[in-house]
Image (spheres, grey):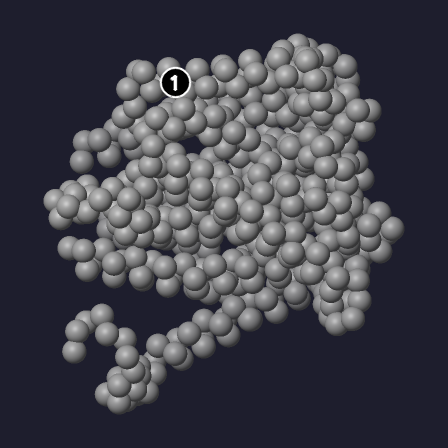
Amino acid sequence: MPEGDRRLTASRLARRWSPASLPRSTALGKRSAKGLAGIVIFASLWELLLVLRIVNPDFVPSVLPIVADTATNLRDGPLREAVGITLSASALGLAIAIVFGVSIGLMMGLSRWLNAALSPVVEFMRPMPSVALVPVAILIFGLGFRMTVALVVFAATWPILYNTLYGLTHLEPLLLDTARALGLTSSRIVARVMVPAALPSILTGVRVSASTALILAITAEIIGGAGRGIGFYIISASFAGDFVRAFSGVFMAGLLGYLINFLLHVVDRHIVAWSFGYHQQEK
Amino acid sequence: MSRSKGSEVLLGWAVIGVGAGLWEVVAHVKGFRFLPAPTVVFSSIPTFITRGGLGNVIVPSLWRVFVGICIASFAGVAVGITIGYFSRLDAYSRAVIDFVRSIPVAAVVPLAIMMFGSTDTMSISVIAFGSVWPILVNAVDGSRRVDPVLIDTARVSGLPNHGLLFRVILPASLPQIVAGLRVALAIALIMVILSEMIGSVQGIGYHIVVAQRGFRVPQVYAGVLMIGILGWLFHLAFRILERYVLAWHFARSERS
């Protein structure tokens, strides 16, 4: 059986469930139990600080009300709507950024002159903190959903563009030489060799941009004080003095960020596995 | 990109020049309200800096970044090395750290405003909260990867515990901590602007928002440009600091 074959066979199934493979899963269980214990310890410390009045209980609510408020408002309440708005702004912005980033990156990566012409502009714009552009975006797009999406697009384009360009300009020379020696036309080299080889790098850019998108969406909502997303939920609650709700919004924002990071981590492991296998096959 | 020829570098700058020139002409002829000409933006930088009083724009922002980064470094290194050295703590703390770390830092600014009001303390605590994570994570990683032979050698040579910490573990994990500090500095710049935009009465971020609310468009762009310049200066200053602090490390890695 070839090494790359991943089909499930009886012998593999048996191996997977054999006692020899069990210690790994119990180790995993032990790890998550410890993680859970850590969370409980953290929550208890939080309560302890409140009880001892090291942290002022007038400003910081205790843990259970925050979690309860999050659950209630998430089931049928404003938080659910806020999560939907923030996520759709991030997703829309990310989608537009992928189109921009990949197409500009492809053009720059394939044309030496275009690359030379545009790279100083890119180098100038890339390190600009997107947060600084919120007031500019408010001036141009007004307060609301469009402003949020525009900022997400701006922030999320750079990692994708840069990684597309990097992937195309750091290909293995042997790959291109082989393709040329085999007499492939240049359009086929681009479509069948260069773009597939750059794909892992492009996906890395998308991964970085995905977490940036969420952060920027929430940031824009907070500074703009509009858009009805999670950022607005947090800032309106805190200015109304509703501390439980404000903390619950932050908790929700953290939860979303954590879930996105977790998902991307899983996706990334698959990409890395695939690209590693790809390079192994090449050699 | 690194092997570009002189003509290509020239082309890149020519594109910037021509683009700025076109922008200038179009802005003057058509007069877009929200896209002022580059010369107008540049010439309003002095106005931007002096309008709020010379010491009220850049100085407060720099001071907040400095104090915030100091707190973040101290806390991050202390907690990070503790977790890295007592490796059992890692499994317990990882979930909590990963969760708190994935809170978009802008979200905590309203909470900080509730607790501290529109004060320096608010800004500094937000900066410290945002920039502590890269330092902490790198300190954990760096101190865990210290060569065990190094630690054993130090023990055998009879180095006391605090000697082990300050003479062996801290220096050995310093290169990675400094790498974390670089990321932290970029975050700190973002956090100071952010906190000043939402709730402050001083600083660059505050004055950008004031200009935006008064529709003084060129000054908004001037402020954004100031932030870009500041970020670049931070980067430069950090490079010098890194060369100085880690001179031994670079010398060592060049030798081997």
Residue appearing at x 45%, y 75% in the figure: A30
Q: In this view of the protein, can residue B77 be seen by the observer?
A: no
Q: Amino acid at mark 1?
A: Leu
Residue A55's spot in the image, x, y percent?
75, 53
Question: Secondary structure beneath disc 1?
Answer: helix
- Name the residue that disc number 1 marks: B11
Q: Position of residue A122 (x, y in %)?
A: 46, 30
Residue sitting at x 74%, y 68%: A74
Residue B64 falls in image quadrant: top right
Where residue B82 appears, as percent x and y from the top left, is: 46, 52
Q: Nearer the viewer, residue A141 or A13?
A: A141
A29 over A111 or under it: above or below: below
User: In which quadrant of the rendered view does residue B191 lie?
Assistant: top right
Q: Residue at x 47, y 59 (%)?
A: A264
What residue do we see at 81% from left, 28% from top? B213
Eyeballing the image, is A3 above or below B54?
below
Image quadrant for the N terminus of chain B? top left
Q: Is residue A234 left or right of residue A179?
A: right
In this rendering, would A214 be left or right of A244? left
Image quarter where the C terminus of chain B lies is top left
Q: Is residue B175 left or right of residue A238?
A: left
Q: Chain of mark 1?
A: B
